[in-house]
Amino acid sequence: MTSLFLEDAYLSTVEANVTGVREDGGIVLDQTCFYATSGGQPGDTGFFERENGDKIIIAGTVTGDTKAEIIHVPAPGQATPDIGEKLVLHIDWDRRYNLMRMHTACHLLSVVCPYPITGAAVSETDSRIDFDMTETIDKAEVTARLMELVKANHPIFNRWISEADLEANPDLIKSKNVRPPRGQGDIRLVCIGEESVIDSQPCGGTHVGETAEVGEIHIGKIEKKGKENRRFRIRFGPAPA
């Protein structure tokens, strides 16, 4: 299966052929623009359009035995496509785009707060990152530094490196608990800024093409979660007065 979102996160519709239907109803295709739940980012929803115009509503997208296997989960009561059938895939673009903006915002927060990441969850309106840190930091200061990066409109692009290159540059990995999968070929880096001057880290998620697309964001709350853990919550819009 070809995961088209890895190279083009803005691809919202594409044709694909059914290569399998699992016992639980999950649909497998030869290629897809649907992102599967991983790395704290939820999988895409949307629908498949059949040649007769009927729709198969997709309630979620998950990975199978490996990250390379993507399974599209139909909503209850949907028709089952035939093996070899050609479908036109349509993701819920408004939802995806908000997730792209939020996931990018999480990367920017990891620049402003350069501490090991112990957990993360991306949603359409409120995302969180947990950092291994003991320092006290002002949320207004973090918000201001985030918005500096957003307004600077830095480019965001992908770069691929070998597993050996990643091993030679362990500082690229910001997560304390999760490591990029091994044995599946090259590793994708998501880079921010000309020549990656702002950031570069392994990530399989979807992101916007320029930081200005993130829009206005703020840190809604910083919570203490244990002696050496701080949870930052990112929200869209201006900080409350």
Image (spheres, rainbow, N blue to C red):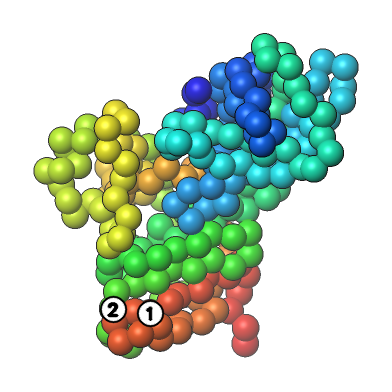
Mark 2 — residue?
A: 133
Q: Which residue is at 72% across, 44% downward?
A: 59
Q: Which residue is at 19% across, 54% downward?
A: 171
Q: Nearer the viewer, residue 51 or 193?
A: 51
Residue 118 visible (yes or no): yes
Tell me the CA gap for discs 2 and 1.
Answer: 6 Å
Image disc number at residue 230: 1
Q: Residues within 10 Å of mark 2 (few under 14, many from 20)?
A: some
Q: Splitting the image into 4 quarters, where does residue 36 fall?
A: top right
Taking 99 as reference, is 115 left or right?
A: left
Check the picture and name the quadrant holding the C terminus: bottom right
Q: Which residue is at 60% across, 26% downward?
A: 28
Q: Residue furthest left?
A: 168
Q: Nearer the viewer, residue 224 or 82?
A: 82
Q: For numbered disc 2, what is the local secondary structure? A: loop
Q: Nearer the viewer, residue 45 or 28?
A: 28
Residue 198 visible (yes or no): no
Across and down, in percent, residue 195 comes to 27, 42
- Amino acid on which the number 2 mark rests in the picture: Met
